[in-house]
Image (spheres, coloured by chain):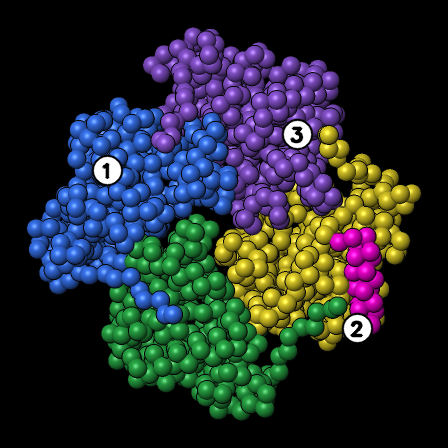
Chain colours: A blue, B purple, C yellow, D green
Amino acid sequence: MTEFAWPQGKVAAAAFTFDVDAESAVLWDASGDWESVGARMSVMSHQAYGPLVGLPRILTLLERHQIASTFFVPGHTADRYPEAIRAVVAAGHEIAHHGYLHEQPTRLSLEGEIDALDRGLAALADVAGVRPVGYRAPMWDLSWRTPALLVERGFLYDSSLMDADHPYELAVGDDHLVEIPIQWALDDWEQYCFLPDVSGSGLIESPRKARELWQLEFDALRGVGGCWVLTNHPFLTGRPSRAAELNDLIGYVAGHDDVWTTSLGEIATHVRALGLPPRSISPPDVPR
Amino acid sequence: MTEFAWPQGKVAAAAFTFDVDAESAVLWDASGDWESVGARMSVMSHQAYGPLVGLPRILTLLERHQIASTFFVPGHTADRYPEAIRAVVAAGHEIAHHGYLHEQPTRLSLEGEIDALDRGLAALADVAGVRPVGYRAPMWDLSWRTPALLVERGFLYDSSLMDADHPYELAVGDDHLVEIPIQWALDDWEQYCFLPDVSGSGLIESPRKARELWQLEFDALRGVGGCWVLTNHPFLTGRPSRAAELNDLIGYVAGHDDVWTTSLGEIATHVRALGLPPRSISPPDVPR
Amino acid sequence: MTEFAWPQGKVAAAAFTFDVDAESAVLWDASGDWESVGARMSVMSHQAYGPLVGLPRILTLLERHQIASTFFVPGHTADRYPEAIRAVVAAGHEIAHHGYLHEQPTRLSLEGEIDALDRGLAALADVAGVRPVGYRAPMWDLSWRTPALLVERGFLYDSSLMDADHPYELAVGDDHLVEIPIQWALDDWEQYCFLPDVSGSGLIESPRKARELWQLEFDALRGVGGCWVLTNHPFLTGRPSRAAELNDLIGYVAGHDDVWTTSLGEIATHVRALGLPPRSISPPDVPR
Amino acid sequence: MTEFAWPQGKVAAAAFTFDVDAESAVLWDASGDWESVGARMSVMSHQAYGPLVGLPRILTLLERHQIASTFFVPGHTADRYPEAIRAVVAAGHEIAHHGYLHEQPTRLSLEGEIDALDRGLAALADVAGVRPVGYRAPMWDLSWRTPALLVERGFLYDSSLMDADHPYELAVGDDHLVEIPIQWALDDWEQYCFLPDVSGSGLIESPRKARELWQLEFDALRGVGGCWVLTNHPFLTGRPSRAAELNDLIGYVAGHDDVWTTSLGEIATHVRALGLPPRSISPPDVPR
């Protein structure tokens, strides 16, 4: 990837991204059993904390630091909390696609994938007047079919793969898609999420530990000229002490003048302009 | 929630609450298979530590700091340990409702929910002469039906939802119920509880880590003027080193003159007097 | 428990105990499927580390500090590693009963419990010429039947319950048994054990964290005049860095002149001599 | 093991080893259901990070410190990433056997074990021109049959057992095999790996914690004159902050002149030259 270069004066990039899952992430179930979780009022309220409390708090943090971010919004969240999503747009942040009901692509048929994409696009258009250029697979679980569906719909980038420290052009047939990689260690779900019988083993870490983990990876990715993409969920990191730690981390990251802290859309636009040769990825052969 | 205000001179509130589950929390089983856990004498003794040892130790701590607390007592605990529960009342603390056998509301029929509520009320009346005004769902798992059942029975407040930093009035039909929110990170179960084949993944944290987690959230909730509600279980936090750490944390919290450290009943009474407009919450629509 | 007193000059007691499970703890299976785990040579070698390497290392530590300890030895371990067990006896430590194949009492019929007890006794007699006075249930999972079986066989004490900070006399029909309580937080299994598809979630803690946890509880149990009983497994804590941390902890504990650091047999003998009134424990009623 | 001695001037040994699993470790499934994981493009990309990014980074680290290491390479990885594996050879490191598709030996028939061994050998020969002398069982799960199969194929050593601090000669019929033991606490999988529905409970530790764990065990194994064998996976420890911590740890270990830091092949050759008496291990009897 010898042609890769960050903008003038920058040695690396950083993005604070937010998956605004709200109820969708726990409601969706591959087996279609959405009733049992939906019947749990406490569980629903745990998820609602995101758009109701966490999201406004995070918008305030970002404004304080003058950081442009990317919010991945399932269509269902937009339909249920339209004002919250419009506030994100009004604050100048990027809205990107995250399924309709947070459907895991690899558990869907082709028709199911198409349906989730198109319903998500419709919801973001209706609620926020937005046509997103970016996509992140719910559960970070892209299928091999998804890239072509994204290209057909004019998406500029995806952010669901994990095989690089830098963005790249992913070959999709004769076309291509910018890929901005992520990694599980830069996600707040593993550090904080616990919902009995729904998610998590019971582990709930201190925000101090999460910040150490994320900041060490920032320092090291900066050292190799990579792209640090943190993913937080408003229903988790929107809690006061986690948001306070995030605030300090934003200050730390933004205090590095040689790092380009921006939205994924800006990064993808930059990458596209580099004219990188697309890279092909194929599924592994499995013997016999 | 612009009308919300804490009492004169206070910028936030804090409550140390205790779920006195004893055996009930592990005996209850949605499938009705209560024999297999009940046959485990060691498991039963692990839970009995709560009322026998942990609870008296916690009462001593609270008296030392002159803190009024709320104890959520399943009816089964009251029936099995009447003297322990009467000691809580005698010490001036609030007794609140926590089911009869710690039944998870979302796994019950309407009749089952009614039965658990009424048997819990009967046990608290018989054993301690108490008619509780507060309720917390076992497993923190309120059903959408529960609030109306609470209003019908004259409850003032519930403390089982997770969608706010402050208490609020929850609309229930034409009536309303004070809601004092909780969160999983302010519970000791995830930090300490391990019972093979019953609960926990094996993780047992140091009391130092738990205290860091809880104190950071106290500092941050105070910063936003919220209501910090810690939930501890006497069978867990009643162990000596955890109680010692709790003692230090109580000292820390109570050392903040601008924070109102009190019981949930006192907080709910204050909230009710504010005359806040009730807030409606409805279950999310699930497409198709 | 007003009559309780430690020996002259001592305010609390401490015991370093070892469950010498070796292969038995992973071989035993309630369903009788012992082949699948036994076929795993690596898993067997992980357990064999205990008697082969960990146990001699621990004996050296104990000798250095001149500490008398209690070793709970399943009969199967004695039969498979007779020299290792004889070395424990030769070093002057107590051997106690821990089942034959580490059978979980609550998963056995009455006949199965009797068989496990009697075969364990026979193995300890044959291999080490020992008639143990102490018992600890495998998996720390005593059944309500076990105490009577122990009394019938002349045992002085059990160490499998979790409902007190101090030893006590457990009423068993018209007779009684000294009970020396344990707790999950004072066990090394939760901190260190991982065997894929056999035990553990993958968590492996640093010995520093384990020591902090155990030392905080020592300090606090000393503060309340209790009995601190640490349980370590030679296949886990026998590893060099864990043994090094244990060595430091033994030094810390033994450095407290006001704490009686000794074997469980010595503690039980002391407790028996106090003539405490036996305490009855009955299984909880389960409604309907 | 009185005859055991390290080379002149050395009191202990250390090896940094790498299991280059890539996709194979998550594709292989005892039930033959390889499609469901293979269909997950994000999961595949998570594994591909190893050969594509992590492995080159690790080679750079090793070169900086002038350390010779051992890389356990499944045949499937060699077939899919031949250039990556040739780069390991070109850098002078040892390539060893790790199955073909990372097949867990204890879940295979005898024929399946033979097939996995021979296909792995063929792939390493074809791709890298290598005939390995060392073997490590995928999933660290040797069967009791495997040692004989290794001897028949002329292997010098295995590194899959866990019952010693030092290497030894394992008796295999009338022949023998050098065994270089490993342990779960010296593996990065438990500290870092999370793949939803594939592996891990959600725990992701900070590289600081992993390093503390590994360094404490290095210090202690050095103290007892043992052999410290660290196992890292390029798809995990190849991430920048983990690699940075590994870099510091290599510096720490290599800074001990009295420790022989080298490859497992070198260690095995040394052990073989000692002419140690082979040690027999037999499966435990299971009663009835």
Q: Quadrant of residue D29?
A: bottom left
Q: Is residue C175 visible?
A: yes
Q: Is residue A17 above or below residue C205?
A: above
> Furthest residue to the right?
C174
* Mark seen at residue A118: 1
How many other residues sit within 10 Å of disc 2, few (<14), some (14-19) or many (≥20)? some
Give the left or right position of residue B180, taking residue A261 as reference.
right
Magenta residues, start to end: C108-127
- Specify few, some or many for label 3: CA neighbours under 10 Å numbering under 14, 14-19, or 20 or more: many
Toward the front, the furthest residue is: A111
Magenta: main secondary structure equals helix
Is C267 magenta? The answer is no
- Report whether mark 3 lies on the same chain as mark 2: no
Q: Is residue C114 magenta?
A: yes
Nearer to the camera, B263 or D86: D86
Residue bearing mark 2: C127
Residue wearing tag 3:
B101
Please, what is the three-letter code of the amino acid marked with disc 2? Val
Q: Amino acid at mark 3?
A: Leu
| Foreground: disc 2 or disc 1 | 1
Residue D34's image quarter? Answer: bottom left
Instruction: Point out residue D199 in the picture as x, y percentages from the top left corner.
Output: 44, 56
